[in-house]
Image (cartoon, helix red, strand yellow):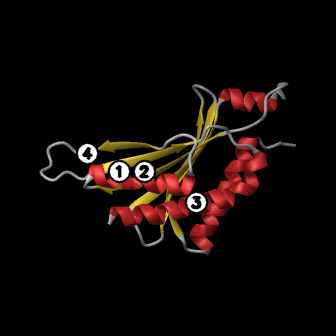
Amino acid sequence: MFDPTVYENLKVAFENQLYDLDTLDRKIDIINRVDRLELAVMSREFTLEFKLAEYAEVSAEIQLTASLKDLAAEILELTGETPACSLQIRFFMEVTDVAKQCNQIKKVMQQIWEPDIEPIQTISYLFGTEFPIYSNVIALSFSRKIGEEQMDDIPELIDHVLKTLTKLREVAI
């Protein structure tokens, strides 16, 4: 009998919550999905990107990863190792006034997430345009990994993502 890893159990938990919000509740639209086994380094990556239903200004991406070390610790039941995965959340939006909007974004992220690690905003634009529109990727990393003990926290985490999307949409307008 196949025994799923912590990574697979967390992946299914995120999928269930997010696909219910898409298909049943119609609160979000899932716009991209990645489910990757990286054979070169024997790692796993699962990513779902979504936006609020009817609003394309801002999107969010939840990424769950498990390295070879994470998977080996669980499968080989290594002493002193706790099976866990890395979690990162990214938000994607366009800004026109970088200084003003990026400061507003920083405040939104601090109010909703109270992060241990400050979110990183990465700005890019298409060179040569007369009035450039800047793409902003806001990355929120966590200082610790997550395991099955945090599975009950997934609905609250997704609720925080939805609140963030709503607030970032206000900044984008």
Q: What is the CA distance from the residue labelled 4 to the residue labelled 3?
A: 28 Å
Residue nearer the viewer, 34 or 87: 87
Residue 102's disc number: 1
Say left or right for 114 vs 144. Answer: left
Q: Amino acid at mark 3?
A: His
Q: Earlier in the sequence, mark 3 or mark 2?
A: 2
Of badges 3 and 1, nearer the viewer stands 1
Q: Amino acid at mark 2?
A: Lys
Q: What is the CA distance from the residue labelled 2 to the residue labelled 4?
A: 20 Å
- The reply to whether discs 3 and 1 touch (Cβ–Cβ < 8 Å) is no
- The reply to whether discs 1 and 2 touch (Cβ–Cβ < 8 Å) is yes
- Relative to 21, residue 43 above or below: above
Kind of element beneath mark 2: helix
Q: Amino acid at mark 4?
A: Tyr
Residue 162 placement: quadrant? bottom right
Q: What is the CA distance from the residue labelled 3 to the residue labelled 1?
A: 19 Å
Q: Earlier in the sequence, mark 3 or mark 1?
A: 1
Q: What is the CA distance from the residue labelled 3 to the residue labelled 2?
A: 15 Å
Q: Residue furthest right?
A: 1
Question: What residue did someone put label 2 on?
Answer: 106
Question: What residue did someone put label 4 on?
Answer: 125
Of badges 4 and 1, nearer the viewer stands 1
Question: What residue did someone put label 3 on?
Answer: 160
Instruction: Identify which residue is drawn at 83% across, 42% down.
Output: 3
Kind of element beneath mark 1: helix
Q: Can residue 15 be seen by looking at this rendering?
A: no
Q: Earlier in the sequence, mark 4 or mark 1?
A: 1
Q: Position of residue 80 (x, y in %)?
A: 82, 26
Kind of element beneath mark 4: loop
Q: Amino acid at mark 1?
A: Cys
Please identify the quadrant where the N terminus is shown: top right
